[in-house]
Image: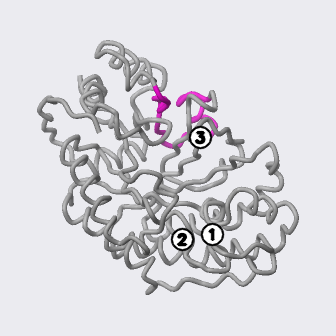
Amino acid sequence: MGRKTVPTIKMFSISKRQRLQNVIDNKPVDHVPCSFWFHFIEKPSLFSMIDRPSASDVLFEGQKNYVAEFDPDFVKVMSDGYFTYPDEALAKGQTVEEWKKVAFVPPDHKWVRMQVEHVKRLTSLFPDTPMFYNFFSPSCMLRWTLGKENYLRLILTAPEAARKILSTVGESVKGLAKAVISEGGADGLYYIVQNPDMNVVSSAVYTSVITPSDKMVLDAANAVSSNHTLLHICGYAGVKNDLSIFTSYESAIVNWAVNVEGVSLKEGKSLFGGRAVMGGFPNTVGAILETGSRDEVQSFTKKLTSDAGSVGVIIAADCSLRLTQDVSHLFWVREALEN
């Protein structure tokens, strides 16, 4: 992560949690908040933290150092190394019949307990900063675990089996969601949904096969966090989604890839029924946050708030930034918002 001397953070009378709550409630704020996030482990989907527990310190230290340096209005606690579902039937099976043997993962499973402790380490260190745990929906987790080809084969050729498998995964991660909030101290989930195969998996198939498990976990998280969920419709690497699928998903805030979907913050606020919205900056290689001058970054920031307004809005990026990002450029965004 790029490092340069950065300005001193201003002090404000309103707390971060109150500011965030005002955003959720579409009430005025002293300044529009912002947050950005990074993966702190290279290729985080390609290994299991259970197999490499020492990497948990790498993840923690990277996250801790970034939060201490930038002090964002809220933190997305990264789940690098926990992307896949810890089940042999899914990890090693090659047929639908094998995948149907997927097992329930109980709340005392090592995979759950390690994540709770990871979240707790950060929430205890920064108690005044709202924190939301990076959390994949059952379908995203299933896709990571099976791989794209097997996932599509399951969804398209055995939809009833897919629904049952997703239900089992959903019941398991409901327990994880509750634990990272009630025990780990997270304010809520940064809940990730995505249909990266929308040209193959139609919106009708998605709604029929996948949506029930999406909402199963989302509803459980909302119940335990007083509806403090950030819904992330992931457009990483240029993936497009049918945003209309997700308008019925209950959340406090909605984040989508503004620059991929071609849907502005203002348009998205209308699409999602006036809910608080988050985003604005592209996260692609060579985008303005990486290469822009101070004036360019601040002009872009001001245009975002000019277009979307300053109520019910959080400035962020389409998705995770690269670790080579110069953090001082993020301070330019904050400076423009505070002034």
Q: CA distance from mark 1 to mark 2?
A: 6 Å
Identify the residue at horizontal 80%, vertical 42% (top origin): 199
| Residue extent of the magenta highlight | 263-285
Please name the residue shown 66% across and 60% down the image. 143
Q: Residue at x 52, y 57 (%)?
A: 191
Q: Nearer the viewer, residue 313 or 70?
A: 70
Q: Nearer the viewer, mark 1 or mark 3?
A: 3
The amino acid at mark 1 is Met
Q: Residue 287 in the image: state x and y as whole percent.
A: 45, 24
Task: From this view, report whether residue 75 is shown above or below residue 292.
Answer: below
> Are the residues at dot 1 and dot 2 in contact (C-beta closer than 8 Å)?
yes
Tag 1's secondary structure? helix
- Check disc 3 and report the residue beneath it: 235
Q: Position of residue 331 (x, y in %)?
A: 25, 30
Point out residue 293 in the picture as x, y percentages from the top left corner.
32, 15
Left or right: where 75 falls relative to 45:
left
- Above-or-below relation of 162 to 202: below
* In the image, residue 284 lies in the stretch drawn in magenta: yes
**The N terminus - image quarter:** top left
| 2 or 3: tag closer to the N-terminus | 2
The amino acid type, in three-letter code, at marker 3 is Gly
Where is mark 1, residue-wise? 216
Residue marked by disc 2:
220
